Structure formats: structure tokens, C-alpha cells
Image: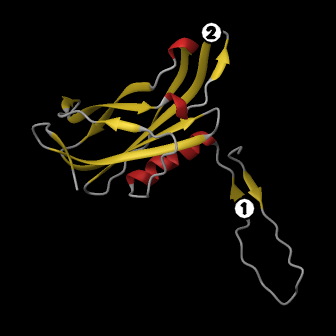
Amino acid sequence: PDGKLHRLSVKLRSHDAALRYPATRRAIGTRERGASRAVAAALGDAADNPLAVAVTLPPAATRAKGAMELACVVRVPAERLALVPEGDNLSGHLSLFVAVRDQSGALSTPSEVDLPLRMPVAERRDVGFSTRVMVRPGTQSLAFAVLDHLTSVVSVTGARVSVAADGAVALAQ
């Protein structure tokens, strides 16, 4: 996947048939696939979660720069990650993509956080990291996509939350 346009050509053995197909196709890279999966989940597409990603939401949002900020914790079980031995350590590489859709349908540009991993072999443990998500009061669809760079697996989870004007956060139906 190089992000370039590739010409497509299809030849049929039978002259009696006609085939319609796009003239070009763009091969997307793994980072772009992670971002697009976060956007799709924010839009309501069913999430595929092979890495068993879990997100913990705070009970309240804090005010920041004229909006509300949620301090979310994203966790991935260590047994689901590809980690490479390097001496006494294990290393890996994740990227987190976050997209938000508000009640009016406005969609954020997905943000990306690069997460290189390194831990002692003897202390292999689940991976947890914090991320801040900007939201507005009202109902929001939050989507979190985690890309494991060693396997190219993208895992997506999300939540619909209701954020009150005072910052109180509750799961929405």
C-alpha cells in the first residue's frame, strides 16, 4: 500500500459480456486505514475489535479552550499485541486514532498518537495510555482505532456519550 493511484485493467474471455469497473484504484497505507476506520466507527459503522481494545471514560469533562475535554484511558491486553524480543525487553509499535461525531453530525478530523512500546520481558503487561478528547455539550459518538504496526491489525471501539453543560458525562443510548 503506497498511496499511489494504480490503473486497473480487466479482460474478458467472452465477447458477449460487458464489465464495468473503476479505471483506477488508490492503495491506502496502514496509517490511513486506521484513521478511516476511526471515522467509520464515529459514523456508526460496526466496529471490529480483534485487539480487545477497551476505553474508560471519565465521570466528568473539564473545560479547555472553549470546549470540554475528556481524559480517556485506552487499554490493550498484552497477549493481543505483537511484541518483538530485543534482549531483555519486548518492543512494539501502536498508533491511536480518535474521531468524534457530535449530535449535529459534524465529524472531527481524526487525531493520531504514535505509541512506541518497550517493556521488560519479565514484566509483560497490558498496555494503557491516556488521551484527551475534545467534545461539546450534547451527545457525541467517540471512536478509537488502535493500529498494531507489526501485524497491520486495526482494532476499533467506541462509545456514545452525553456531555452536560456542567461537564457531567454519561453513556448515551
Q: Are marks 2 and 1 in contact (CB under 8 Å)?
A: no
Task: Please indicate whether residue 100 sits to the left or right of residue 137 in the image.
Answer: right
Which quadrant of the rendered structure holds the N terminus?
top right
Q: Residues within 10 Å of mark 1 (few under 14, many from 20)?
A: few
SS for tag 2?
loop
Residue under the point 22% across and 36% down:
67
In the image, taking residue 107 as reference, residue 115 lies left or right, namely right
Q: Please name the amino acid that badge 2 sits on.
A: Asp
- Name which of mark 2 and mark 1 comes first in the sequence: 1
Label 2 CA crowd tier, 10 Å (few <14, some 14–19, many 20+): few
- Mark sitting on residue 24: 1
Q: Which residue is mark 2?
A: 88
Pick the residue in front: 3 or 140.
140
Residue at (52%, 19%) from the top-left corner? 124
Question: Where is residue 90, by image quadrant?
Answer: top right
Residue 63, quarter of the rendered image: top left
Given this view, does label 2 or label 1 mark the residue nearer the observer? 2
Task: Give residue 89's mark.
Answer: none
Label 1: state its secondary structure: strand
Which residue reaches farthest bottom?
16
Q: Distance from label 2 to label 1 (Cα)?
A: 47 Å
On the image, the x and y values in percent for residue 25 come to: 70, 59
Residue at 42% x, 52% y: name it: 41
In the picture, the quarter occupied by the C terminus is: bottom left
Can you say whether 168 is above or below 158 in the image? above
Q: Amino acid at mark 1?
A: Thr
Q: Total marks drawn?
A: 2
Residue 67 falls left or right of residue 3? left
Work out which residue is located at the far top of the displayed protein and give it. 88
Task: Give the percent coordinates (x, y) of residue 92.
Answer: 59, 24
Please say if 38 is above or below 129. below
